[in-house]
Each structure stands twice: as C-alpha cells, then as structure tokens.
C-alpha cells in the first residue's frame, strides 16, 4: 500500500491512464477483441495492482456517463459527457511510490493502454495547500 511517509526516500507519482484508440469496455469494438487478448490485458492490470508500491484508484465509468462541470458567472454549468473526447478519456489512475521518475516510468510502461494506442501520463504528487 502506498503511504506518504516523510522518513522514506521515495517519491509519489500519479499515473493518469488515457484510453486512446483502444476500444472502451462494453463497446461492440471491445467485445470483438479476442478473449485471449482481453484476458492478457486484465492479467497485466492484476499484476500491477499486486505491486506493493502501487495504489490503484477506483475504476472510472465510461465517458458517455460523465458530467462536466464549469462555473460561469458564479454558477455551475453542467454538460453531459466527458471534458475530452473518447480518445482523450481518462480510464483510471494510480499512485506509485518510486525512488525516481525512471522507476515510475517502469511501472507506467506495464499499463496496457501505454502499448494499445493510449498513454500514461506521470505527474509528481504535490501539495498545494
């Protein structure tokens, strides 16, 4: 489990997982993928979730079920759908404790979307308040 222990010499990084061109779960395109390929992807995620230095976030729902909120003239304005298009949709996130960026990159490279038309963005964790 990831902790924020100032006595340890590790850094926290947030991995933001973008779906990219890989089909979203539940879509006809996703269902058309071979069962063996889907099983391998799920196995990759299961292996990552077992790493002691990784804490996964909860699975995110599909972009079409999202609501985007902006504030205009002091009032919230909502629009249905994701802030970004489906290819830019965030599929999930995780927090990784690592000695350095290179170690965080090694974990991010194991995320299936990194090789399946999406991307994994790594951001150092920071406190702003």
Image: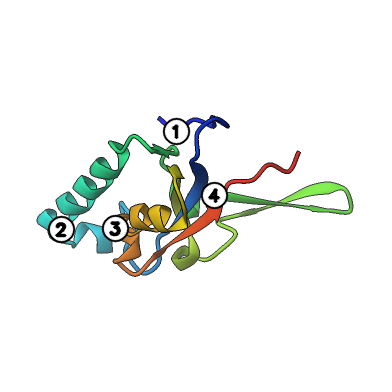
Q: Residue at x 10, y 55 (%)?
A: 36
- How busy is the neighbourhood of tag 1: few (under 14 within 10 Å), some, or many (20 plus)? some
Q: Are marks 4 and 1 in contact (CB under 8 Å)?
A: no
Q: Earlier in the sequence, mark 3 or mark 1?
A: 1
Q: Can you tell which of label 4 and label 1 is closer to the viewer?
A: 1
Q: Can you tell which of label 4 and label 2 is closer to the viewer?
A: 2
Q: Residue 70's spot in the image, x, y percent?
A: 74, 53
Q: Residue at x 64, y 45 (%)?
A: 126
- Residue position for label 3: 112
- Residue position for label 2: 37
- Residue position for label 1: 2
* Structural distance between the alpha carbons of marks 3 and 2: 11 Å
Q: Residue at x 12, y 54 (%)?
A: 35
**Residue placed farthest to the right in the image?**
73
Q: How many marks?
A: 4
* Structural distance between the alpha carbons of marks 3 and 1: 21 Å
In this rendering, position of residue 92 left or right of residue 52: right
- Residue position for label 4: 66
């Amino acid at each position: 489990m990831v902790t924020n222990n100032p006595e340890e010499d590790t850094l926290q990084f947030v991995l933001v997982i973008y779906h990219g061109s890989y089909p979203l779960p539940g879509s006809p395109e996703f269902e058309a993928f071979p069962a063996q390929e889907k099983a391998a992807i799920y196995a990759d995620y299961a292996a990552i979730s077992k790493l002691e230095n990784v804490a996964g976030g909860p699975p995110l729902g599909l972009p079409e079920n999202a609501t985007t909120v902006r504030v205009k003239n002091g009032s919230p304005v909502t629009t249905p759908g994701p802030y970004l298009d489906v290819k830019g949709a965030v599929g999930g996130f995780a927090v990784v404790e690592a000695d350095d960026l290179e170690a965080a990159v090694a974990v991010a490279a194991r995320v299936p979307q990194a090789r399946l038309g999406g991307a994994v963005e790594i951001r150092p964790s920071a406190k702003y308040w």
